Amino acid sequence: MDGLRFDGKVAIVTGGAGGIGAATARMLAARGASVAIADIATKRAEALARAIPGALAVPLDLAEEASIEAMVARVVAHFGRLDVLHNNAALLGPEVAQADGDIEHMATALWDRTYAVNVRGTMIACRAALPHLRASRGAIVNTVSNLALQGHVIQAAYSSSKAALIQLTRAIAASHGSSGVRCNAVAPGMTMTPALRDAFPPALRAMVEAETLRPQLGEAEDIAEAVCFLACEAARNITGQVLVSDGGCASHVPGIAGFRAFFAGEPA
């Protein structure tokens, strides 16, 4: 069980002020890590940091190179080292989701901003962190999405940016593995964070629930467990991988909900 602990280690969680990031920050701290909560929502990050002993809140704008580099520098200056970088922050929110549809109707500005935050920002965070992670033989865990593995009628910009992060994950694993740095990704499906409960239409949520192989959708803590596993010493032989944590949505034939209903004798 010692391999699942983070005693004496330092972790950065970007987008750590809420949802999956907040759950991961709490879990890493509960397992011994000193945690830096990096987020553009500074007040929420500070409130969470006050609730986690020894945690540090750090302002972060993933669209700004200087902000990313300053975040890493501040964390290392404060804690003296860096062992885990969890790249969880992404361009999200109800307005963005509504605007992110199919390619024919895609605004170039939304596409560019999505890639600037999700891909370019994550790359810069990795670049800034790598010298410190090499020194500690640390780990990177990138949050991607099961939408990066499937086609959909919505979120073309988001899903393709997350697919780019999968390749970034593999590239870092390949180029820095011999230096002792591991890099993996976790791919959540629809996850019941407070923001999703408030913003996602119930009818669409029910459609995803029907395609889930578990009795319910995953919670933020389910994704945090996957992140913590990939970051911990027990996973030292795992790198360059994508761990899908979506309740089985991406693992089955299309339309499984209809097949269930058919063989249960339910009306079409």
Image (cartoon, grey):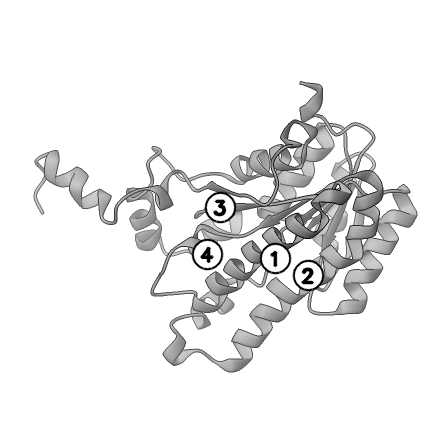
User: What is the spatial separation of the Cα atoms under label 4 and label 3, in whole angstroms?
Assistant: 10 Å
Which amino acid type is marked by label 2? Met
Q: Nearer the viewer, residue 178 or 151?
A: 178
Q: What residue type is disc 4 on?
A: Ala
Q: Which residue is mark 4?
A: 148
Three-letter residue code for mark 3: Pro
- The answer to whether 40 appears left or right of 161 in the picture is right
Pair 2/3: label in front: 2
> What amino acid does circle 1 point to?
Leu
**Residue 245 sits above or below residue 142 on the image:** above
Query: Which is more N-terminal, label 3 or label 2?
Result: 2
The alpha-carbon separation of the residues under discs 1 and 3 comes to 17 Å
**Closer to viewer: mark 4 or mark 3:** 4
Q: Image quadrant for the N terminus?
A: top right
| Between discs 1 and 3, the one toward the N terminus | 1
Instruction: Please name the residue shown 71% across and 27% down the image.
Output: 31
Q: Residue at x 78, y 51 (%)?
A: 130
Dot 1 surroundings within 10 Å: few (below 14), some, or many (20 or more)? Answer: many
Residue 12 has which mark? none
**Residue at point 66% right, 33% down?**
27
Comes first in the chain, label 2 or label 1: 2
* Mark 4 surroundings: few (<14), some (14-19) or many (≥20) residues within 10 A: some
C-beta proximity under 8 Å, tags 2 and 1: yes
- Residue of label 3: 188
* Image x and y of residue 232, in percent: 68, 32
Q: Earlier in the sequence, mark 4 or mark 3?
A: 4
